[in-house]
Image (cartoon, helix red, strand yellow):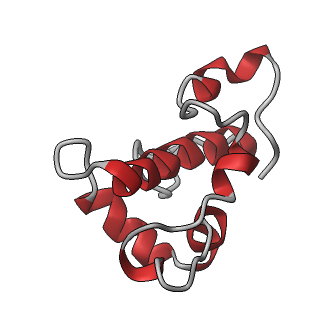
Amino acid sequence: MEPVGGTEDLATKALLPAGITNMVMWGKTKFAFGKYEKEKTNYQTVFEKDPSYVSWCRKHLTKDSSKGPALDWSRYIKARDLVDCKTANVPFYAGTALRREFCD
């Protein structure tokens, strides 16, 4: 994952929390809740190494059901999905890592 930069990434920059300057910095955030709290694992590592947990979080951590660190992690997942979709230049289904396929 590359740092977010340039005018083409204004939508992604708008998702960054206050005090966070880019996705790399946000990805270094240590977990402060749940399954990975005791390990002090960072967001980027979990996002890349535990897709089943990320998938579970996509479904269960919403702005209505989460707050604090859990909501921050949920927002990080959404931002990463957006960044990864732009990087791959392949359309994904919204809020997932599933690539969209098209018929001929």
Q: Is residue 101 visible?
A: no
Q: Is residue 84 visible?
A: yes
Q: Does 77 sit above or below residue 79?
A: below
Locate residue 7 relative to residue 90 in the image: left or right. Answer: right
Q: Does 67 sit above or below residue 53?
A: above
Locate residue 17 relative to residue 33 in the image: left or right. Answer: right
Q: Residue at the top extreme?
A: 7
63 or 6: nearer the eye? 63
Q: Does 87 sit above or below residue 65?
A: above
Q: In the image, what residue occupies the spot 74% across and 43% down?
A: 87
Q: In the image, what residue occupies the spot 46% across and 77% down?
A: 37
Q: Quadrant of residue 69?
A: bottom left
29 or 23: nearer the eye? 29
Locate residue 39 relative to residue 96 in the image: left or right. Answer: right
Q: Residue at the left extreme?
A: 64
| Picture mark count | 0
Q: In the image, what residue occupies the spot 62% across and 68% down?
A: 42
Locate residue 59 relative to residue 18 in the image: left or right. Answer: left
Residue 94 placement (x, y as % from top left) = 40, 42
Q: In the image, what residue occupies the spot 49% across and 52% down?
A: 77
Residue 45 placement (x, y as % from top left) = 65, 72
26 or 91: nearer the eye? 26
Q: Does 61 sit above or below residue 89?
A: below
Residue 75 placement (x, y as % from top left) = 44, 44
